[in-house]
Image (cartoon, rainbow, N blue to C red):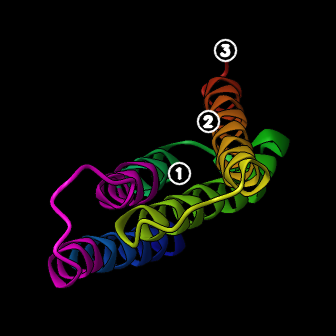
Amino acid sequence: MKKYLNTAFIYALLALAGGVFYRGFTKFNGFTGVTALGKLHVHLFTLGMVMFLLVALFSAQLPLEKQKNFRAFLKLYHIGVPLTALMLLIRGVLEVLATPLSRGMDAAISGMAGLGHILTGVGIVLFLLSLKKAAGE
């Protein structure tokens, strides 16, 4: 349980740093529009901190770590969420700086962000399946 609480804490720190960066970076650059940077903070809090607080609570009550799906969840989720966050950061910085992107580069950023979301989604499904199995259903 402690390792999941530590993971939640790390995601919380990253979320806070993302929020501070968003506010400071946009203010420093005089940017007042909507940017992907604004979503970074929320993604890291909900998909990172909140999710691992839930994992910690469930792991204290159920034998989650014995589930094969749970181990796969951890691997995929720890790739998907940071990848998604990184792409939000990159997209947001480029938006604030008004950096022109080629169609290929724009598609590459969107594709990597999509891959991060897919891995995160598959991870969530694996987590739910491992919860069901650990609960004996």
Numbered label attached to residue 132: none
Viewed as shown, does residue 18 lie left or right of 11?
left
Pointer 3: what residue?
A: 137
User: In front here: 123 or 127?
Assistant: 123
Pointer 2: what residue?
A: 124
> What SS does tag 1 mark?
helix
Between circles 3 and 2, the one closer to the viewer is: 2
Viewed as shown, does residue 25 lie left or right of 9?
left
Q: Earlier in the sequence, mark 3 or mark 1?
A: 1
Question: Relative to 129, is 59 above or below?
Answer: below
Question: Relative to 95, is 110 above or below?
Answer: above
Q: CA distance from mark 2 to mark 1?
A: 15 Å
Q: Position of residue 90 (x, y in %)?
A: 54, 68
Label 1 amino acid? Answer: Ser
> Is 22 within the magenta?
yes
What residue lies at 49% left-to-right and 72% top-to-bottom?
7
- Give the extent of the magenta segment: 21-49
